[in-house]
Amino acid sequence: MNEIILAIFQAIELIVELDPKLIQITKLSLYISLTATLIGSLISIPIGGMIYYYEFWGKRTIINLIQTLYSVPTVLVGLFLFLLISQQGPFGFLKLLFTPTGMIIGQVLLILPLLIGFTITALVGVSTQIKELAISLGASTYQTIITIIIEARYAIMSAVILGFGRAISEVGVAILIGGNIRGFTRTFTTAISLETSRGNLVLSIALGFILLSLSLVINFLLNYLQGKD
């Protein structure tokens, strides 16, 4: 027990002293997850808007499929992408395996269903009068969708924050696609797993504290945005 308490204090000391290894892992983790969240948002919000706006055959089935993919295991996403970008895969020539770029692509694939589904849910919550008013004023389909998205902006921002939280805390894609290479693709989750297996509890706890702090920030932002709705 005393060793654990000592490790906790040493972990806090690492954070206060801005340990270079700790900073490097933190910066890389944030870069990968923030980039993936931005790209995922730019793709999913328009798609979610179009799925919400248009009525077509199979719409309910597509939405159910998207919702089913919310909880897809990250290791399956990692395996799927690995098969595509490995040397024997169809996109092996791009040399994305064991690179930050490959990890970003993996995290984008992981959070897309969540972002699309939550965008649709957010738009459904907007009063139909907004849509009808925009159409009656002569707004085009594009302008109407944009108007509804703006009206649901806080709920959509909450979805984006949730997507970031899922991205930064995942481990399957990070290991299979990133390879956990020191100084190049090692992130929070892979570093914690590795250092704990090595018995280096101090660094693991320090990384855990930072990840927990990010979770608290995400929760605070979600509560704030939900209060705006």
Image (spheres, helix red, strand yellow):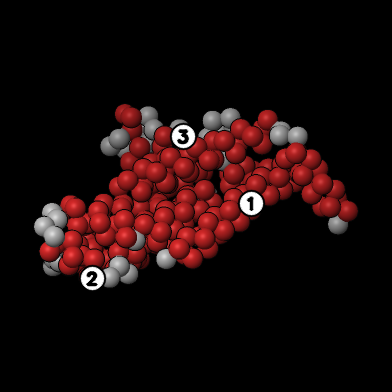
Residue of label 1: 213
The picture quadrant where one finds residue 117 is: bottom left
Tell me, yes or no, whether the two marked residues, 2 and 1, touch with CB atoms within 8 Å.
Answer: no
Amino acid type at mark 1:
Ser
**What residue appears at the point 18 percent right and 61 percent down from the top-left corner?**
134
Number of the front mark, 2 or 3? 2
Q: Is residue 126 left or right of residue 74?
A: left
Answer few, some or many: residues within 10 Å of disc 2's Cα (few below 14, many 20 plus, some between 14 and 19).
few
- Measured in 3D between alpha carbons, the distance from the residue under mark 2 to the one under mark 3, in whole angstroms, is 42 Å
Tell me where residue 33 appears, x and y as whole percent. Answer: 48, 43
Residue 75 on image: x %, y %: 46, 52
- Which secondary structure, mark 2? helix
* Sequence-first tag of 2 and 1: 2
Q: Say which element carries label 3.
A: helix
| Crowd band around label 3 with a 10 angstrom C-alpha radius: few (<14), some (14–19), many (20+) | many
Q: Which residue is mark 3?
A: 100
Instruction: Give the residue pinned by disc 2.
Output: 128
Residue 85 locus on image (x, y percent): 35, 37
Q: Amino acid at mark 2?
A: Thr
Q: Residue 57, image x and y in percent?
A: 13, 67
Looking at the image, is mark 2 or mark 3 earlier in the sequence? 3
Asked if residue 82 lies left or right of residue 51, the reply is: right
Asked if residue 191 shows in the view, the reply is: yes
Asked whether residue 180 is in view, the answer is no
Q: Which residue is painted at 32% across and 69% down in the image?
A: 125
Task: Name the quadrant containing residue 18.
Answer: top right
